[in-house]
Amino acid sequence: MRLGVLDIGSNTVHLLLVDAHPGAQPVAYASHKRPLSLVKFLQQDGSISERGQTELIDFVQEAWAFAGRHNAEDLLAFCTSAIREAKNGQAVLDRVQSEANVTLQELTGPEEAAMTFFAVRRWYGWGAGTILALDIGGGSFEMAMGHDSLPAHATSVPLGAQRLTRDWLPQDPPTAKSIKDMRKYVRDTLRPAVKGFDKLGPPHLVTGTSKTFRSLARIAGAAPSGAGPYVRRVLQRTDLGLWAQRMSAMAASDRVHLPGVSEARAQQLLAGALAAEAAMELFEIDELEICPWALREGLILRRLDQLVFDGPLEPPAHIGPIQSERLRSERMHPSRARV
């Protein structure tokens, strides 16, 4: 079947179409995305501006049409911290439903962490033992750990790279004081979250997922994306600390020339590096491995598992095939997810 995953993140809005069936690895078919940073459209009162809502709806309509043109049979549409934490988040969801005819699933932070962990577990398999999965997005930082398909503990903190840049590093390049203040804030926020993992013991494998960790590993010497997903990529804490120090003295226009750093990510990469460095220090991690699968893949794989348990979707004849996502929408929660 051809499955569409519409990801409304804090940095980008992205539709990925994959060809997949239960028991097989999903294969990317087509992609449509836009560098729409919803965090930048947050107003003083914490609500998403009218312009931000309009651009979001425009993209969702584009994505819906794109999925239809490419014969998608099912559509998973979800949003993360940018809308979840916005003061008018529910109103934005209602407006997307009304004007774009798409229902966005709002994932909680722990749900987001759990589904990312689910993808990491599927990538590495049971032989990896206990896994600690870290994921830095634009608005939040997810952490999850366990030895089963779903984590024993999953949490989320508001330490996304875009959010930290907006709130703590407004100058370009940033001042030494702003970096010092942000470091303290990040550690103060992370410390209680990290402590919640103490009862689980040390992990056998630590992974970093998504664009921030991939970019940091690339500038520290990991293989480029063109080498393919099966090349082992690692990020050493010592290398991360060195590059965090170097980027502290760089303007965004200089960071964009680093390997693997896009113009859209250059501004926020320092904040992501400082958050990653703090997490590795507090977890006492010397090295982590970059996992090519993350939240989107977790949701895809879970959807395929649903088809095994529940059977294929059979939408009524008067409803188009990709509209079937509304017939079976359910909130995902680590304690209830079936795998």
Image: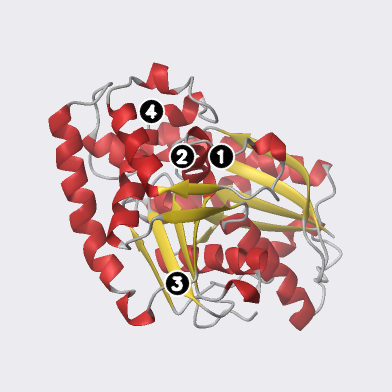
Q: Nearer the viewer, mark 2 or mark 4?
A: 2
Distance from label 1 to label 3 (Cα)? 23 Å
Q: Position of residue 51 (x, y in %)?
A: 43, 31
Q: Point out the tag, 1 or 2, that comes first from the N-terminus.
A: 2
Name the residue tied to disc 3. 203
Residue 216: which numbered mark, if any?
2
Q: Residue at x 29, y 41 (%)?
A: 164
As helix, strand or loop, the secondary structure at mark 1 comes to loop
Distance from label 1 to label 2 (Cα)? 9 Å
Residue 65, above or below 7: above
Q: Nearer the viewer, mark 1 or mark 2?
A: 1
Q: Point out the tag, 4 or 3, that comes first from the N-terminus.
A: 3
Q: Point out the tag, 4 or 1, that comes first from the N-terminus.
A: 1
Q: Position of residue 118 (x, y in %)?
A: 58, 69
Mark 2 crowdedness (10 Å alpha carbons): few <14, some 14-19, many ≥20: many
Residue 192, above or below 177: below
Residue 169 appears left or right of 293: left
